[in-house]
């Protein structure tokens, strides 16, 4: 994820000497911004394994990790790989975890992939290339490809209950990479120390206000949620868009940037309230380049639901906020890569936090206040569901939750 930092510019004025003659000393060259890169293969209660760090013009390589930093080239790179991963005696396994961080001046991009991920012996994904979170069969939580600033973590598993001799609270991290290159510092000026500090404070005050305004403009908008009466189904679900909507079964349609459409687009006027589908907790409330203003909802049954392209968030839509089915969490819009399309909600269902499944049969039922019986999927699609092997089991689990 790119990280942008803005630094104030200090204007250096020449001081007038005796008799009005201008005296300007030769300013020394600015010190180059130091590039840094860090990586390690694994970290647990017993410590770290395979940790490497590089600064300035340095590079190091180990069995599973490599780091390189170049102040002159203004680049930094860190990579980490782990194979045959086994966490907490088989609770989490993967054939490989690969992460990478690449940095230029003030900008870091991260990427990663986890292969053959399984939880409690059950395979949940052949490959994971985007951030996900999973429940560990009631024993804890697993974050996959978690990013933050200039770093990425391949797997981070934390126990919330004791498991096979491992204590509650034990945390294991597999695959860590971080890289950063600060923006170049301004060259030292020729004024006295007091004059320099005064000029710098004045320059920072002048730039602080525009920077605060810019941050406010970038921040996702929030609106007061109207009081609505949303009708629930027998199992406590609500349709995600309040009224005046239209949608079709566009699951799997080709997409230029993401490959295929992993949800359904529900079209409605800009500002139409968007509702929590189920009781649960909000997370990852914020803005990304492709989905625009987006929010995730984790239901009490452990399913995750994704809402994208919102025009604004509701005032109470914050990370960790507890919601009930029918609560307003945002408003229909066309943010992100949907700016050239009619306003709509991009909606996804991830049963048990795993890969996405087609929301269409659920939406069709929810709009008439019905629940989808487990047999409905087979009745609609017969023996060819048009999805990956195992989807029928996943959907059945979801409906039974």
Image (tube, grey):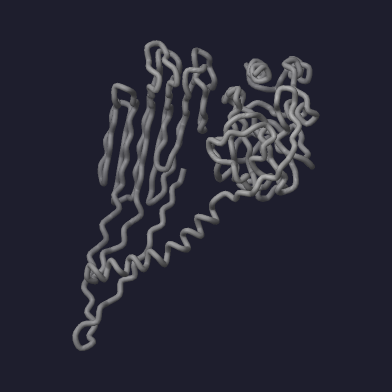
Q: How many marks?
A: 0
Q: In this view, which residue lies farthest toward the top?
A: 164
Q: In this view, which residue lies farthest toward the bottom?
A: 19
Query: Residue 227: x, y in percent?
Result: 71, 42
Which of the image's four quarters has the C terminus? top right
Q: Is residue 335 above or below residue 230?
A: below
Residue 14 position by quadrant: bottom left
Residue under the point 38% across and 15% down: 166
Query: Residue 368: x, y in percent?
Result: 80, 29
Q: Is residue 318 above or below residue 378?
A: below
Residue toward you, 119 or 277: 277
Relative to 70, 87 lies left or right:
right
Residue under the point 36% across and 41% down: 179
Residue toward you, 52 or 354: 354
Residue toward you, 267 or 59: 267
Residue 305 position by quadrant: top right
Residue under the point 65% across and 50% down: 339
Query: Residue 251: x, y in percent?
Result: 70, 31
Query: Residue 280: x, y in percent?
Result: 60, 29
Relative to 323, 104 lies left or right:
left
Relative to 69, 359 lies left or right:
right
Residue under the point 49% across and 19% down: 136
Q: Is residue 35 above or below residue 277?
A: below
Q: In this view, which residue lies farthest toward the left?
A: 18
């Amino acid at each position: 994820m790119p990280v942008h930092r803005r630094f104030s510019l200090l204007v250096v004025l020449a001081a007038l000497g005796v008799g009005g003659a201008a005296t300007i000393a030769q300013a020394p060259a600015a010190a180059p911004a130091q590039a840094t890169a860090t990586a390690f293969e694994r970290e647990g209660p017993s410590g770290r394994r395979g940790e490497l760090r590089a600064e300035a013009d340095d590079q190091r390589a180990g069995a599973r990790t490599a780091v390189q930093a170049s102040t002159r080239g203004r680049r930094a790179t860190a990579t980490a790989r782990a194979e045959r991963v086994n966490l907490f005696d088989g609770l989490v396994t993967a054939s490989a975890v690969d992460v990478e961080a690449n940095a230029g001046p003030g900008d870091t991009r991260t990427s990663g992939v986890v292969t053959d991920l399984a939880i409690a012996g059950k395979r949940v994904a052949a490959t994971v290339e985007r951030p996900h979170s999973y429940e560990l069969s009631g024993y804890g939580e697993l974050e996959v490809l978690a990013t933050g600033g200039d770093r990425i973590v391949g797997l981070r598993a934390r126990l919330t209950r004791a498991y096979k001799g491992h204590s509650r609270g034990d945390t294991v991290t597999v695959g860590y990479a971080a890289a950063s290159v600060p923006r170049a510092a301004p060259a030292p000026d020729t004024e006295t120390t007091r004059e320099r500090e005064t000029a710098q404070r004045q320059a920072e005050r002048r730039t602080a206000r525009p920077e605060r305004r810019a941050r406010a403009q970038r921040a996702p908008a929030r609106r007061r949620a109207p009081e609505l009466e949303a009708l629930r189904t027998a199992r406590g679900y609500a349709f995600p868009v309040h009224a005046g909507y239209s949608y079709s079964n566009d699951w799997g349609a080709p997409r230029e940037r993401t490959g295929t459409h992993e949800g359904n687009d529900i079209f409605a006027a800009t500002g139409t309230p968007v509702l929590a589908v189920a009781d649960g907790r909000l997370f990852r409330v914020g803005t990304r380049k492709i989905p625009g203003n987006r929010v995730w909802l984790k239901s009490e049954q452990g399913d995750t639901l994704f809402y994208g392209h919102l025009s604004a968030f509701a005032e109470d839509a914050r990370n960790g906020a507890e919601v009930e089915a029918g609560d307003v969490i945002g408003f229909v819009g066309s943010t992100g890569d949907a700016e050239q399309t009619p306003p709509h909600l991009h909606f996804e269902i991830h049963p048990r936090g795993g890969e996405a499944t087609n929301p269409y049969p659920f939406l069709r039922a929810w709009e008439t206040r019905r629940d989808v019986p487990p047999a409905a999927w087979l009745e609609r699609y017969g023996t060819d569901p048009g999805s990956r092997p195992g989807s029928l089991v996943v959907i059945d689990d979801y409906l039974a939750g």
